[in-house]
Amino acid sequence: MVDDGFWLSGGFSGEGGGLGNSDGGGTGGDGGLGNNDGGGTGGDGGFVEGGIASVVAGCSTHPLDLIKVRMQLQGENHVPNPNPQVLRPAFAFNSLAMAQETLHIPAPAPPRVGPISVGINIFQSEGASALFSGISATVLRQTLYSTTRMGLYEVFKQKWSDPDSGKFPLGRKITAGLLAGGIGAAVGNPADVAMVRMQADGRLPISQRRNYKGVVDAITQMSKQEGITSLWRGSTLTVNRAMIVTASQLASYDQIKEAILDHGVMNDGLGTHVTASFAAGFVASVASNPIDVIKTRVMNMKVEPGMAPQYTGALDCALKTVRAEGPLALYKGFIPTISRQGPFTVVLFVTLEQVRKILKEF
């Protein structure tokens, strides 16, 4: 961020975006995500069920997502010092010797802290309520982004499943996830930018904070001060991340769940859903974390009129991050991402099943 803002998703991963996809669903014949032969209601019901489950999961894991965003912004201002400290020898008798023996000492890198320390620091310095900063943006983001992608995935699944066996081949799962995730991210990007900025605001000096009153105020101020296009800042990264997260998570969840059921490791129930969810979350986290870090920093970037932006684009952000902080900087916030995605997917799937049962009664 550093001001705040980046899409995340994210979050303790990040969906993002959490990765809460629409698969928590039914136990179809092939063990998939609510397939035609044993899953959710499909059609419009997929949008409603997925939206409700995503909002519940997103709100319950919001503090983890906030910590992830703060960790991804660590070290962002630490760039190579153009004026390093100059140390001269204690006894320099002439300018030639001085020039030859001058030592340039680079500024030390700031210490990095883990998710627990970040959370404690936020609690102590900003109060408990700060852990829920930007939750209104999370609700809007899940309503727009996750509802769209989960509903579209169910639509694609219905149309592309084999009419005879009811199977949904892996290749089609990945394609459906890519399309659904990309469309959903484009729809939800304004809320994603607002969420990142609101989550990151507390780490700034008081004089530099934006102090948005809520997601509507954040979107309104961004539109007035930075132009309507600022609402889609980092949208390319957001779309790319959402496509990777949705495809990797949904496809891996489906495949892992099918393997568990086919080999008789566990029966189709909560244990199977939890195991497949955590495994899918890990796969999606590994694939999406570098894009998530870059996205967060681009979204959080503050652009002043007449001033050159901190980053000219995603590639520039990635190069500057790696040069200043090393390649592992692209995996900042990885532990929070994993920590969030596990609970997120479990809450998502359990909620989704309950919502489906309730809706079927009407």
Image (tube, rainbow, N blue to C red):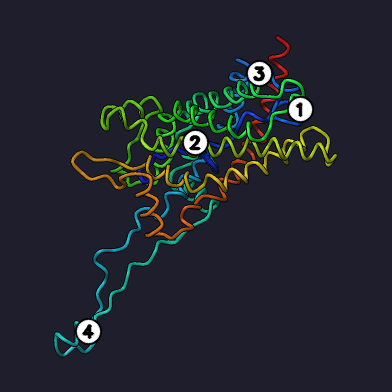
What is the distance, in whole Å, between disc 3 and disc 1 at their CAs?
A: 13 Å
What is the distance, in whole Å, between disc 3 and disc 4 at their CAs?
A: 75 Å
Q: Amino acid at mark 3?
A: Gly
The part of the image, by quadrant, that contains residue 105 is: bottom left
Q: Amino acid at mark 4?
A: Gln
- On residue 100, the disc is 4
Q: Is residue 40 left or right of residue 108?
A: right
Q: Residues within 10 Å of mark 4 (few under 14, many from 20)?
A: few
- On residue 42, the disc is 3
What is the distance, in whole Å, between disc 3 and disc 2 at their CAs?
A: 33 Å
The part of the image, by quadrant, that contains residue 13 is: top right
The front one of 53 and 252 is 252
- Pointer 3 or 2: first along the chain: 3
Q: Which residue lies at the image location 27% right of the left edge and 69% below the top edge? A: 84
Quadrant occupied by the N terminus: top left
Q: Amino acid at mark 2?
A: Phe
Q: Is residue 311 left or right of residue 175?
A: left
Q: Residue 184: where, in percent of width, then height? A: 50, 27
Closer to the camera: disc 3 or disc 2?
A: 3
Reading the image, the residue beneath label 1 is 27
